[in-house]
């Protein structure tokens, strides 16, 4: 059985705003990989590897996200196990 619940966003820890995330341009390296100089500083995060954004990209600023679980005793539990055990 599938159960949906609201949980605190793991990215912003419930704040929703002013969140530090991995720089999308350099993937957290701080290096501009497209530049001729192999060690050029990323121009988005200025070499830090992370940037601060106004709104959390995971929860959209709400501070919580939907999380689904599989409860015990439901009809779909056995099928879900079979899928993860390499069933065709």
Image: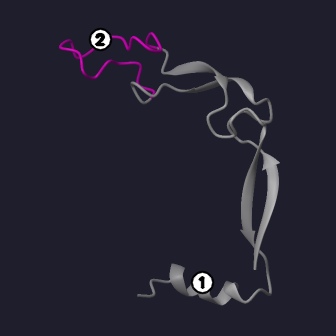
Query: Is 75 placed above or below 43 here?
Result: below
State which quarter of the image contains the N terminus.
bottom right
Corner quadrant of residue 4: bottom right
Which mark is on residue 39?
Answer: none
Query: Is 78 placed above or below 8 here?
Result: below
> Is residue 26 located in the magenta-colored stretch of the structure?
no
Picture coordinates of residue 35 (x, y %)? 23, 15
Residue drawn at 61 percent across, 18 percent down: 52
Depth check: 55 or 48 in front? 55
- Graded by Cα atoms within 10 Å as few (under 14), some (14 to 19) or many (20 or more), the crowding at tag 1 reads few
- Residue indicated by mark 1: 81
User: Which comes sooner in the sequence, label 2 or label 1?
Assistant: 2
- Residue indicated by mark 2: 40
Residue drawn at 80 percent across, 50 percent down: 7
> Is residue 40 located in the magenta-colored stretch of the structure?
yes
Residue drawn at 73 percent across, 57 percent down: 67
Along the horizontal axis of the image, is 34 left or right of 43?
Answer: left
Picture coordinates of residue 20 (x, y %)? 63, 23
State which quarter of the image contains the C terminus.
bottom left
Q: Assign the magenta stretch its main secondary structure.
A: loop
Range shown magenta: 28-47
């Amino acid at each position: 059985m599938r159960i949906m619940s609201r949980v605190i966003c793991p990215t912003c820890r419930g704040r929703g705003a002013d969140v530090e995330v991995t720089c999308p341009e350099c993937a957290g390296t701080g290096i501009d990989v497209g530049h001729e100089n192999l060690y050029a500083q990323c121009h988005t995060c200025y070499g830090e590897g992370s940037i601060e954004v106004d709104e959390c990209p995971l929860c959209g600023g709400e501070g919580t996200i939907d999380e689904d679980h599989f409860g015990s005793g439901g009809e779909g539990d056995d099928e879900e196990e079979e899928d993860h055990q390499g069933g065709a």
